[in-house]
Image (cartoon, rainbow, N blue to C red):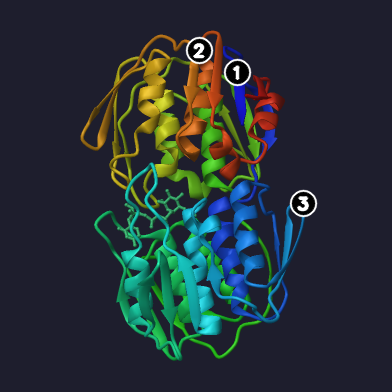
Amino acid sequence: MDKVVINGGRRLEGQITVSGAKNAVLPILAATLLTEDKSVIKNVPRVVDVQTIIKIIEALGVQVNNEGDRVEVIPGRYTSFTAPYELVSTMRASVCVLGALLAKVGRARVSMPGGCVIGLRPVDLHLKGLRALGAKIKFNHGYIDAVSSCLRGADIYLGGAFGSSVLATANVMMAATLAKGRTVIEGAACEPEIVDLGNFLNKMGAGISGHNSPVIVIDGVKKLHGAEHTVIADRIEAGTYMIAGAITKGDITLKNVCFSHLGAVIDKLKEAGVDILKGNGFLRVRREKELKPIDVTTLPYPGFPTDLQAQMTALMAVAGGISIITEKIYPGRFMHVSELNRMGAEIYIEGPSAIVKGVKSLSGAPVMASDLRASAALILAGLTAKGKTEVSRIYHLDRGYEKIEDKLSVLGADILRQKE
Ligand code: UD1
């Protein structure tokens, strides 16, 4: 197993390019299954989660060609409709093939994704939406077994206890494209990744409107065709590097950024005393002043993203005062806190909030990554800490960040990957 070793204290400076959005490309690759034709997806990040969805698509008997950041999917005829446990268990987002398979071949067997360290993560909203379209769904031996001879449009409310669901919206939207008649999803997720999926589906010939609002209307069509699409930039990767610039008192420029997707993140970083300059397709992040403590609450888009909560907690760990970070999407998503405290942070958990008492500096230590974004938070802490930080179990990191140690090295970080 690999670990990342960081010698902290270097100021980050320079320019890097943000990769395509992992959370956009996963449902988009699933959507390519809605036609027999070839689709071409560009700006695909080279991360393990993308390899996992490609393996799932290949397990259905579908041809996939992947070269660099370009993926070609040529569905032709399926030989299977099962997304197997071995693959789904490594990535919950695999559940996004459910809607596409059901719509295209009338049958889907997808291993039931389990809980994970960031919380329970049920799939009730996915199933509620697909059942409303007419699917018959059973659970057999750990699998979701869905069949439908003909999906029919319906009015569906998809809001849940913690707000809208990104992948439930994606699944229902995909299934509804080939359903008979009109589907209206209320309480739909408005995340940019859903907008990107809707845009791709429309390029395939779907009749979707309102897919940047909580009410999405889908007029079913008989057939979809192949399409070419360039995936949007990864706002979570961008946000992580913005925080890297801020935590090291650096001056970095990010290319291939979409500012409008980063409104809440830019606002919170400015409030913390970080200078953000927007240029033509790039964003410059510079910190000269001391960090101010701020309160952050994660919310569905356009609120502050839960996927940047751990990284923001690391930043506030070295701000001068008390910050309150409240998690409204996954109330238990604080596994990074005990590891940050091992590095000298003073963070206390009170229900769904982390009370962060900023300290002058962190001290490098061996720490363990528990999930994808927690790994990023520990790396950020390591960049500012005094001395050596070793982050182990970094396979989580490779699921969602393309070449993170290379990009940070370009910015001047002393970081390398080692075999444990
Ligand atoms: C997606 C993102 C993930 C991000 C999350 C929230 C992808 C591949 N992953 O995950 O990185 O952290 O959005 O922004 O896009 N819920 C239910 N019932 C359901 C589904 C979800 O109660 O059927 C709850 C979840 O437990 C959570 C909340 O709804 O509390 C939001 O989860 P959801 O938006 O569904 O997350 P994902 O789409 O799985």
- The mark that comes first in sequence, 2 or 3, is 3
Pointers 3 and 1 in contact (C-beta within 8 Å):
no
Q: Secondary structure at mark 2?
A: loop
Q: Which residue is mark 3?
A: 68
Query: Where 226 sits versus 141, above or below?
Result: below
Is residue 277 toward the left or the right of residue 335 in the image?
right
**Which quadrant would the C terminus be assigned to in this image?**
top right
Residue occupying the point 40% across, 29% down: 336
Q: Residue furthest left?
A: 351
Callout 1 crowding tier (Cα within 10 Å): few <14, some 14–19, many ≥20: many
Callout 3 crowding tier (Cα within 10 Å): few <14, some 14–19, many ≥20: few
Q: Given the image, on which type of amino acid does mark 1 rest?
A: Ile
Asked whether 110 or 404 is in front, the reply is 110
Q: Are marks 2 and 1 in contact (CB under 8 Å)?
A: yes
Quadrant of the picture in which ligand 1 is shown:
bottom left
Q: Earlier in the sequence, mark 3 or mark 1?
A: 1
Left or right of residue 19, residue 340 in this image: left
The residue under label 1 is: 6
Residue type, mark 3 in image: Gly
Marks 3/1: CA–CA distance: 28 Å
The x, y position of residue 168, in whole percent, is 40, 65
Residue marked by disc 2: 364
The kind of residue tagged 2 is Gly
> Which residue is at 55% across, 80% downward?
206
Residue 98: percent from left, percent from top:
48, 71
| Residue 187 visible in the current orientation | no
